[in-house]
Image (tube, rainbow, N blue to C red):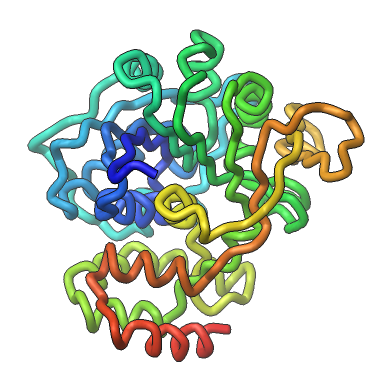
Amino acid sequence: MDATRNVIIDCDPGIDDSLALLLALNAPELNVVGITTVCGNVPTHIGAANALKVLALADRLDVPVYMGANRPLAVDYVSAQDTHGDDGLGNSQIPEVTTVHPAQDAVSFILETLDEDPTTSILALGPLTNLAEALQRDAAAFAAVDQFVLMGGNYKSHGNCSPVAEYNFWCDPDAAKLVFDLMPVPIHMVGLDVTRKIVLTPSLLAYMKDINPEMGRFIEKITRFYFDFHWKYERVIGCVINDPLAVAYLVDPTILTGFEAYTTVVATDDLARGESMVDDHEFWHREPNSFVTTQVDVMAFWRQFLTRVIGATEPDLTTVLHQLLAVGA
């Protein structure tokens, strides 16, 4: 892998998107050339404002932010503000960034960036509306993309907004289906089967605050609402942080394992809306279009996150992680 990989991050910040942005911005292997926002966890303009808040925290306001789709392709828009708070950051009331402002037309930015550097990787952390629109406009622009990684879908795990569907695919099922149908490079699907293993526990949070008080307090502030939601609805002590795992996988693909398969998405507004259908037995006899991740090295993920975002160092980190993850098991 090249020392530095250019990447566009398409997202809907969102608590876990914000943690993912922090990881990407602190990964020397990645050069974030732009952030595009889509309606998902929160409306597009709120997501863009949250992206700027994260960029300000990371001292990276040089990274441009572009706003994209305000609604799904066909279905009505349903946000996840019940999970992420009205402001998308756990009702933390973090001040708005006023020194820079997001730009318009995320789709044009994506296509223009790929025209300049066709190998730019794409990391999709929200509903796939922007990318579906870009593919409909010019699918050939994606032909040389180095890696296309998305957080979304589920293989064997149950859904998180219906018995069968993960939120990003459920929010805009038509876009998800179009992306799997039209994307000319393999789609690396980091779904709920693996992200549910990444739980930020009170013990991990306490460790973060001890090592890096400023960053730890920020993470505590935005995840407190998330902790309460997970306990109320799932009886989880802590919170699942889905999106950072997709970033970690782009940085280090050995963190996840899985298999190649043909995958499609149910694009109808019925009980199966947004279901990701993985043909693991080659029933349809179609060429694989995806790499479906099924197993995760939890220790490797937290080592990457804590060293990059929090500044934790060895030799004590491995011992500490064994203790913290044992407590959170």
Q: How far across and down, in percent of the image, does residue 284 sit?
A: 89, 30
Between residues 173 and 23, which one lies in front from this camera angle? Answer: 23
Q: Is residue 298 left or right of residue 304?
A: right
Image quadrant containing the N terminus? top left
Residue 108 place in picture, x, y as percent: 36, 14
Q: Is residue 101 left or right of residue 45?
A: left
The image quadrant of residue 105 is top left
> Is residue 277 shown above or below 14?
above
Relative to residue 112, is residue 311 drawn left or right? left
Q: Nearer the viewer, residue 72 or 259?
A: 259
Tell me which residue sits at (19%, 76%) in the image: 213
Location of residue 224 by image quarter: bottom left
Q: Position of residue 296 (x, y in %)?
A: 58, 64
Residue at 28 percent across and 81 percent down: it is 314
Q: Nearer the viewer, residue 82 or 170?
A: 170
Q: Is residue 41 above or below residue 147?
A: below
Q: Residue furthest left?
A: 99
Extreme-right residue of the structure: 283
* Residue drawn 30% across the image and 49% down it: 29
The part of the image, by quadrant, that contains residue 34 is: top left
Task: Give the residue drawn at x 32%, y 21%.
Answer: 117
Q: Image quadrant for the C terminus?
A: bottom right
